[in-house]
Image (cartoon, grey):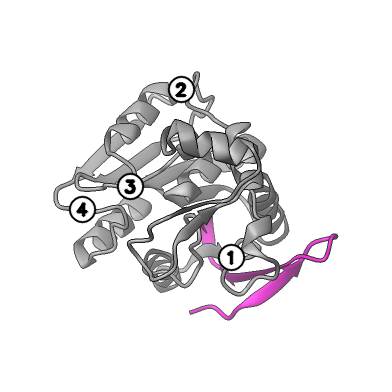
Amino acid sequence: MAETRFHDLPDGRRIAFRHATGTGPAIVFLPGYMSDMAGSKAGAVMAWAQAHGRQCLLFDYSGCGESSGEFADGTLGRWLEEAAALIESHVAGPVVLVGSSMGGWLALLLSSALGERLAGLVGVAAAPDFTDWGYSHADKARLAAGETVHFDNPYGPEPTPTYAAFWADAQARRVLGGEIPLDCPVRLLHGQDDSDVRPELSLRLAAVLRSPDVQVTLVKGGDHRLSRETDIALLLRTVAAIA
């Protein structure tokens, strides 16, 4: 595994990252909400890249993993800025984005900044606009009033928070309301038993992507994480084919 290094942003944020040099396109992994580069999918992508001499970048959003800051200060815009800065500073040439859950939303937002550098995009249970469809009217009203909303966390003992600033920023960055002007190949992987992001969302996303080269793969028995051995093998085959 590549060693952890730190990228300093002008405002003092220190973003932890791991970068493997090699041939391109570079594979950049974007974790999900409250996730980091220590996850099984990110680690598998890095290991595959190193085994095949491919360039790869992993990183932790501010407030997550080994990066500085508080999670409560995180927003899509803030994390988007960090992703763009790391790619600009440490990655050469074309890029393939691999986005897990919220990372899939970030990948779509990042695609416009990358422009022609974007060679492909892989979404794993991609969750664009989840602040819109994933919350009740009552929860939205509380968030709009500046409150923090907590939800049961199936992956750990502590509840999962959504902060008002994150929600407001994300609502301003929704992408599913019209055509998404993305022209590179896109592969969307989604578990049929995903109870967090229903698989129909990947079909909805495929319909609004401008690219003619979009494929959706539904995984029988797969949950939101898609982290079983067979799921990760599928992810690596998909990355290898699109990169």
Tell which circle, 2 or 1, labels the residue nearer the N-terminal end: 1
Which mark is drawn over residue 23? Answer: none
Which of the two residues, 118 or 122, is positioned nearer the viewer here?
122
Image position of 210 with respect to 74: above or below? above
Helix, strand or loop under label 4? loop
Amino acid identity at mark 3: Asp
Q: Are marks 2 and 1 in contact (CB under 8 Å)?
A: no
Which mark is drawn over residue 196? Answer: 3
Name the side, left or right, on which 64 lies relative to 241: right
What residue is shown at x 24% (from left), y 41% (from top)? 217
The label nearer to you, 2 versus 1, is 1
Amino acid identity at mark 4: Gly
Residue projecting furthest to the top? 178
Cα separation, mark 2 vs mark 4, equals 27 Å
Could one spot residue 26 in this view of the protein? Answer: no
Q: Residue at label 1?
A: 60
Q: Residue at label 4?
A: 222
Cα separation, mark 3 vs mark 2, equals 26 Å
Amino acid identity at mark 2: Arg
Name the side, left or right, on which 74 lies relative to 191: right
Q: Are marks 3 and 2 in contact (CB under 8 Å)?
A: no
Tell which circle, 4 or 1, labels the residue nearer the N-terminal end: 1
Q: Which stretch is magenta? A: 1-30
Helix, strand or loop under label 1? loop
Q: Residue at label 2?
A: 210
